[in-house]
Amino acid sequence: MARSPDTPLLIAGLGNPGSEYAKNRHNAGFMAADAIHARHAFAPWRSRFQGQFAEGTLAGRKTYLLKPMTYMNESGIAVGAAARFFKLPVESVVVMHDELDLAAGKLKVKTGGGDAGHNGLRSITLVLGPDYRRVRLGVGHPGDKARVHGHVLSNFSKADEDWLTPMLDGIAEAAPLLARDDDTGFMNKVALVMKPPAKKPKPDTNTKDE
């Protein structure tokens, strides 16, 4: 069903509050929200809906950014409160989160589905149902289920910055496509920013036939 052009968009980036978590893999959603906020001249962050909240515009569409401050396991409290207040249909909610089942540096967008053990998604699904849009930010899997907790709650490494910085830059640049509900275009744009096409060498016009 087509949305009304006047329906705002809510983009929630997931993470844990506090400086000790700021660079954790589990905070990739916070980092993505901050990147969009900085690129698109949103209003300053302020405390609202038990989170950090900012208003702005993407592609001419009213857009709300939200970083729940409830800790990951209760993300649904903040996201649900904002969605209810603005009377948003579930398809106008986008959740950005770290994803173990994607290789580090990979990004995919999907609508609906399970939570794959992600406590933030589980909390949001309990409040909204499963049919919101998800921007899945690959952080890789440690290879052993017993190491998952430590993996997501440890900091991105120096080597990770080689893909993390371009991915966040791509998310910021491509964010207007989320507001246009063009999830495929968004993914393609991020991929293009992360891996721009190689420039073809210019033909040598000075070469003369012998």
Image (tube, helix red, strand yellow):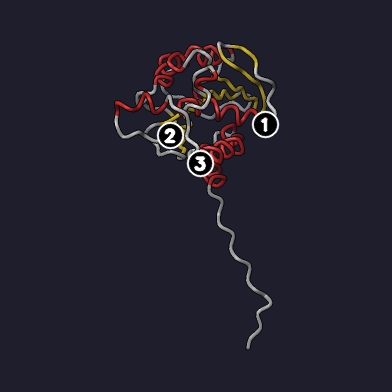
Q: Amino acid at mark 2?
A: Val
Give the image quarter of residue 3: top right
Q: Position of residue 95 (x, y in %)?
A: 50, 25
Q: Amino acid at mark 3?
A: Trp
Mark sitting earlier along the chain (3/1): 1
Q: Amino acid at mark 1?
A: His
Which quarter of the rendering shows the C terminus?
Answer: bottom right
Q: Mark 1 and mark 2 in contact (Cβ < 8 Å)?
A: no
Front in this rendered view, residue 9 or 152: 152
Mark sitting earlier along the chain (2/3): 2
Q: Position of residue 136 (x, y in %)?
A: 45, 32
59 left or right of 124? right
Which numbered marker is on residue 93? none
For mark 2, give the secondary structure: loop
Q: Nearer the viewer, mark 2 or mark 1?
A: 2
Up the image or down, 7 lies above or below 207; here it is above
Up the image or down, 196 lies above or below 58; here it is below
Which residue occupies the extreme front position in the image? 158
69 left or right of 129? right
Front in this rendered view, residue 59 or 6: 59
In the picture of the structure, the residue carrying the numbered disc 3 is 163
In the picture of the structure, the residue carrying the numbered disc 1 is 40
99 left or right of 194? left
What separation in Å lies between label 2 and label 1 (alpha carbons)?
25 Å
In the picture of the structure, the residue carrying the numbered disc 2 is 139
Q: Position of residue 77 (x, y in %)?
A: 49, 11
What separation in Å lies between label 3 and label 1 (alpha carbons)?
22 Å
Give the image quarter of residue 82: top right
Q: What residue is rendered at 48% in x and 40% in y?
A: 159
Front in this rendered view, residue 130 or 149: 149
Q: Please count the marks in the image.
A: 3
